Image (cartoon, helix red, strand yellow):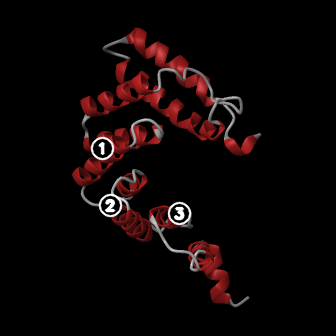
Amino acid sequence: MYASEKSQLARGERNTDALKRAVSAISWNAATHIDFALAALNETPPNFGSAVASAARAGVFNQWESQAPFIISQCPNGGTLEARIALGTRAIQLDPYNRPQYYWGLSRLLRQKGDRAGELSILLSAAQRYAGISGPIGPEFPRPNWMENNITFASIYSRLSELLKDSQPTAAVLYAQLARGFQGAPMVGSL
């Protein structure tokens, strides 16, 4: 292996290139571009430019694809903060049921903006949307691939507890208890 290849491998650049070569024989669609975007985010360091470009192409292929606007919204080079908030909101509008991380991601953008009321509103929406999930997600859950969301739910409930501690202390305590329940839950790769 040449020194330049070792350098590329160390930076993770070959992962995206290998993925592109592997799928070069099939037609690309929105899902392919989402995979490219996610691979770019998993490079070391993350390649935000490639992630945004791939997610934007996915949106061109399928305007109803919710992951595309979400990925762009979470990248620092995805536009102005206001534009990224609009994209995060759009992702939730496109898929309000299957991706709790969209609520958490949008809440982080609203916190960055300093919009405490907006952050509280979106987190309360998430708590209401997923009220049926009140404990850690394990392999027995109807969708075991949701175990990766344990950390998302812990984050949502922990932040709700922080936001409500002065105005609604009883609710804050309940959300803190929910957060602790999700914090020790197993993750997908830990079984």
Left or right, 82 with respect to 185, comes to: left
Q: Secondary structure at mark 1?
A: helix
The amino acid marked with disc number 1 is Thr
Q: Residue furthest bottom?
A: 2
Q: Which residue is mark 3?
A: 35
User: Disc 1 to disc 2, how far (Cα)?
Assistant: 14 Å
* Side of 1 where 87 appears, left or right: left
Residue 137 x, y percent position in the rendering:
63, 30
Residue 15 shows which numbered tag?
Answer: none
Query: Dot 2 lies on which element?
Result: loop
Q: Is residue 181 above or below residue 147?
A: above
**With respect to residue 72, does 28 lie above or below?**
below
Which badge, 3 or 1, is on the more N-terminal residue? 3
Residue 4: percent from the left, percent from the top? 63, 88
Local crowd at mark 2 within 10 Å, few (<14), some, or many (≥20)?
Answer: many
Residue 78 numbered tag: 2
Would you call the spot at circle 1 few (<14 residues within 10 Å), some (14-19), or many (20 or more)?
Answer: many
Residue at position x 68%, y 31% in the image: 138
Rendered residue at 45%/31% (across/down): 156
Q: Residue at image x 44%, y 66%?
A: 51
Q: Earlier in the sequence, mark 1 or mark 2?
A: 2
Which of pointers 1 and 2 indicates the residue nearer the eye? 1
Q: Position of residue 50 (x, y in %)?
A: 43, 71
**Dot 1 and dot 2 residues touching (CB under 8 Å):** no
Identify the disc placed on residue 89. Answer: 1
